[in-house]
Image (cartoon, rainbow, N blue to C red):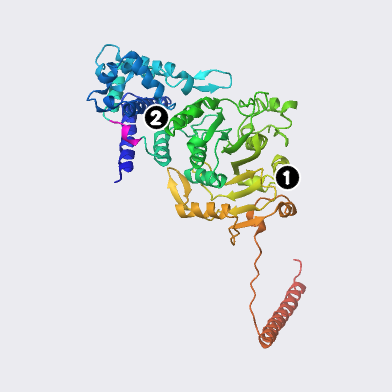
Amino acid sequence: MTKALEFERKTKDLIDDLKSVCANYGLGNDGNEFKIITQVFLYKFLNDKFIHEMKQLDKKLADADDFAAAVAQLKKNDYEMLLMQLSESTAHLKPTQFIAALFERQNEPKFADIFDNTLLDIAKENNDIFSVMTDGGEKIVLFENISKYVTDKRDEFCRAIINKLIHFSFENIFQEKFDFYATIFEYLIKDYNTNSGGKYAEYFTPHAVAKIMAACLVTDKVKNVTCYDPSAGSGTLLMNLAHAIGEDKCTIYSQDISQKSSNLLRLNLILNNLVHSIPNIVKGNTLLEPYHKEKDGQLKKFDFIVSNPPFKLDFSDYVADLNTKQNQQRFFAGTPNVPKAKPEGMAIYPLFIQHIMFSLAKNGRAAVVVPTGFITAQSGIERKIREKMVEEKMLRGVISMPSNIFATTGTNVSILFLDKANTKGDIVLMDASKLGETVKEGKNQKTLLSHEEEDLIIDTFNKHEAKEDFSVVVSYEQIKEKNYSFSAGQYFEVKIEYTDITAKEFTDKMNSYKSNLNKLFAESKTLETEIKKQLEGLEYN
């Protein structure tokens, strides 16, 4: 087993140990378990990263048998000088806030209060860098009172947590790259980023979809670019995009109505060395109150946008507020009517598509997950959106994915790619629906793509290749001729098979057909005569 895989196993074991502690104290499958698990995990990560960086800065600390004691002996000025040299992604801790310090104090009275206050103080002291903003200007801090979720035996609960944390160290994995942390993050939140029956679905975007979107968006080396997701969830799409660009070459912006998702995205940013973007993570309603704006009040334009928006949602309580004069340009195709029978069936994704189109920079690119029905709808808002993409020459391509690529929804999905610099056309339409292997995931069927299939999709798309029954390359004019259809299948050539035969073979076949027809006609005449004869013999009785 490689070093990285061994650390991955140990890290997953730590996560399992923390979940076991929660279960032992009545919090298994509790709605608050994810808050405890993710915050404790983050505390451990920040603790070990602080220690790791301090040791890199000071050889005496690195060689000390007791790191906490060595730090405590530093003069105040020396300690503050070291803090100034830490990277911006490293939280500042005091010696009394180390996990080792709490481990030593675990038998003191009211240890739960000591534990909670330690985390609250760390959050307060690092508030400026690590807080997530709400659209109302409030700050959501790193940590909260954790032991409050335990009804009794709070001290014992916090002792159990500290004893799990003390025997594990992240120090040797900070050099690991994106793939390592992506795997760890997915394992950490795998039970917590699902639609548990609440109003807002928080589906986890499959790795294959995220990888394809990023690889098809980032085809050149870029730097100092902005990346945005208006419905970010826990940030899978943004992390893949940032990794494709380079974490130090981009700045992340996001907004999501879910506080849980915003907190998970913050954790994802910390793990992936993107702490500099945390101030741009906003909890709020993107459609109703888009947060990111320029100094003149206009909505900010972005270089790259990725999104897997909710497809259907009841937003009838604020749809009227979207139909204002100031939103006419953003929602150019309109907003849906509220169905009387099932308002929860309101299609919300077309509003996100319009918002994304409006938010693209001059040469911006975007990739959006849409229901496959969007690419062929011949009326309504969806049709108007597609027409504008073609008329304004910003369509880059569409990839129709296999069924059940999302195990949590049976809706067939496609990935829509926009590129405002694609004015000459050369649009790739791809039908990848036949790829993948279907497997069982819980009660659901899920389609998994192999690495080779992922690469086939990416390479074909980026090389603008036409492959029989798989992909076509078309112009804007051809799309207009097909009633603005973005479906690859409508552009595939209809193949008619021909067989070369001689004149004699042709004559023989035709004579055979004539002979068979004459025979059938004769049988038909006989049958007709017999039926008439039988009818004439019928009498009324």
Q: Which residues are magenta?
A: 168-173
> Which quadrant, please, contains the C terminus?
bottom right
Question: Dot 2 surroundings within 10 Å: few (below 14), some, or many (20 or more)?
Answer: few
Magenta highlight on residue 246: no
Instruction: Return the x and y of residue 530 as percentages of the image width and height.
Output: 72, 77
Classify 10 Å Cα crowding around label 1: few (below 14), some (14-19), many (20 and above): some
Q: Which mark is residue 29?
A: 2
Up/down of 339 relative to 2, above or below = above
Please determine whether, in this image, residue 226 is positioned above or below residue 421: above
Left or right, residue 5 beside residue 412: left
Q: Is residue 152 visible?
A: no
Side of 340 where 305 appears, left or right: left
Front residue (pair 206, 118): 118
Could you tell me which secondary element the residue under label 2 belongs to? loop
Q: Position of residue 394 (x, y in %)?
A: 68, 44
**Left or right relative to 329: residue 312:** left
Residue 23 position within the rendered picture, expressed as x and y whole percent measured from the top left: 33, 28
Q: Examine the image and state in which quarter residue 21 appears.
A: top left
Q: In the rendered structure, are the residues bearing label 1 and label 2 in contact, judged by CB atoms less than 8 Å apart?
A: no
Residue closest to the eye, 298 or 140? 298
What's the residue type where badge 2 is placed? Asn
The answer to whether residue 268 is above or below residue 433 is: above
Which numbered circle lies on residue 387? 1
**Closer to the N terminus: mark 1 or mark 2?**
2
